[in-house]
Image (spheres, rainbow, N blue to C red):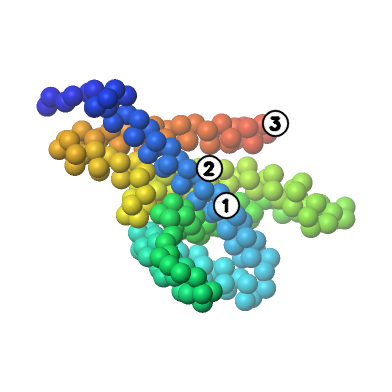
Amino acid sequence: MDYDWELLGFGPDGWGPVLLRAAGVTVAVSVTAFLLGVVLGTLCAWAKIGGNRPVRAAAEAYTVILRGIPDLLVIYLFYFGGRQVVAWAGGMLGLQGPFDISGFAAGAIAIGLISGAGQAEVFRGAYHAIPVGSLEAARVVGMRRFLMFRRIIAPQALSTAIPGLGNQWQSVIKESALVSVTGLVETMRQVTVAAGSTEMPFFFFAAGAVIYLIITSISGLVFKGAELWSQRGQAPARL
């Protein structure tokens, strides 16, 4: 196959600049969704561990529903359903339309909710991995709950959770490709446009695969470094 590699360059006929911007949008959506997932996952895990029965039931329902519905359907619900909700709220306030919701916001919220359900289980497992003796010792010396969380629970749980969070981040990166259905020009959307414009689908979809691979590979190195940093001063595990 004969390909014009200049199409990936930054010249007048190159798609390099728009592909680079699209990759930046992919990272921005993924970071926003992941951080939202961290917040929701932390709250959900805390509810499952220390909440009363109704709170635990609500947290369990959240994880079951979000992990059981297809990711694409969740994005559709937030994008198309979100516009109806915004239009209804605007009408109730007496505002004139048309009303819309951005693909970025809908995609980031939807993926964040999905990620939060997965991260909740990661955090819950990390909490239960903390040695019981550490928690009992903290209670014996009279540590209050917030101080115990800051000095005992958070450091040890985070060290255990980092590999799982890394997996969740990689999932968020791949799920971000689904946001293209909202019209947001991220990597998947841009390579689709480029493939249709040049009639070279294999070439540009392969370029998109390389972009995602670069993002996930760099992310893997970052999380690996974070894992090693969190384990500093600890004896290496023996197999």
Dot 1 or dot 2: first in sequence order is 1
Mark 2: secondary structure:
helix
The residue type indicated by label 3 comes to Gly
Q: Which residue is mark 1?
A: 38
* Quadrant location of the C terminus in the rendered image: top right
Q: Which residue is mark 2?
A: 163
Return the residue nearer the eye: 214 or 14. Answer: 14
Is residue 65 visible in this depiction of the protein? no
Return the residue nearer the eye: 16 or 97. Answer: 97
Is residue 215 visible in this depiction of the protein? yes
Determine whether label 3 and label 1 are within 8 Å by CB.
no
Seen at 74% across and 52% down, the residue is: 149
Q: Is residue 77 above or below residue 145?
A: below
Instruction: Using a 10 Å C-alpha cutoff, classify the residue at mark 1 as few (fewer than 14 neighbours), some (14 to 19) or many (20 or more).
Output: many
Q: Is residue 209 above or below residue 179?
A: above
Q: Position of residue 152 (x, y in %)?
A: 74, 48
Dot 3 or dot 1: first in sequence order is 1
The residue type indicated by label 2 comes to Pro
> Is 126 left, or right, of 174 in this rendering?
right
Mark 1: secondary structure:
helix
Q: CA distance from mark 2 to mark 3?
A: 18 Å
Q: Nearer the viewer, mark 3 or mark 1?
A: 1
Q: Position of residue 185 (x, y in %)?
A: 35, 45
Q: Position of residue 98 (x, y in %)?
A: 40, 65
Q: Is residue 7 above or below residue 83?
A: above
